[in-house]
């Protein structure tokens, strides 16, 4: 009967799931609040006009913002 999961396997999976959730919650919170705050960083760049030297920084900020939006999307939805 090795194909049937034991209670010990179920407890181990529950524990691993809980630890994973607890480890991800701070990352999710930081990502959420970063997604909220990052648009403030766009203001100086856009107010002064984008020069060719500023374009990589602006694109990096957009990529960071998109990543923060994805990682923080589930924050406080419990």
Image (cartoon, rainbow, N blue to C red):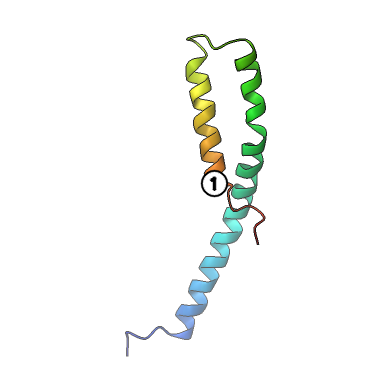
55 or 30: which is nearer to us?
A: 55
How many residues crowd around disc 1 within 10 Å: few (fewer than 14), some, or many (20 or more)?
A: some
Residue 68, position as x, y percentages in the image: 56, 40
The picture quadrant where one finds residue 22 is bottom right
Residue 24, position as x, y percentages in the image: 57, 54
Q: What residue is shown with label 1?
A: 71
The C terminus, quarter of image: bottom right
Q: From this view, report whether residue 62 is shown above or below residue 45.
A: below
At 52% from the left and 66% from the top, the residue drawn is 17
Residue 64, position as x, y percentages in the image: 53, 33
At 66% from the left and 37% from the top, the residue drawn is 36
Q: From this view, report whether residue 3 is shown above or below residue 38.
A: below
Q: From this view, report whether residue 22 is shown above or below residue 30.
A: below
At 57% from the left and 60% from the top, the residue drawn is 21
The picture quadrant where one finds residue 3 is bottom left
| Number of numbered callouts drawn | 1
Residue 37, position as x, y percentages in the image: 67, 33
At 54% from the left and 46% from the top, the residue drawn is 71
64 or 17: which is nearer to us?
A: 64
Say what secondary structure mark 1 lies in: helix
Q: Is residue 63 left or right of residue 30?
A: left
The N terminus, quarter of image: bottom left
Q: From this view, report whether residue 62 is shown above or below residue 23.
A: above
């Amino acid at each position: 009967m090795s194909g049937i999961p034991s209670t010990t396997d179920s407890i181990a999976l529950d524990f691993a799931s809980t630890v994973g959730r607890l480890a991800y919650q701070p990352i999710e919170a930081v990502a959420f609040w970063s997604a909220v705050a990052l648009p403030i960083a766009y203001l100086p760049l856009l107010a002064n006009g984008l020069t060719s030297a500023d374009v990589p920084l602006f694109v990096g900020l957009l990529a960071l913002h998109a990543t923060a939006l994805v990682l923080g999307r589930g924050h406080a939805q419990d």
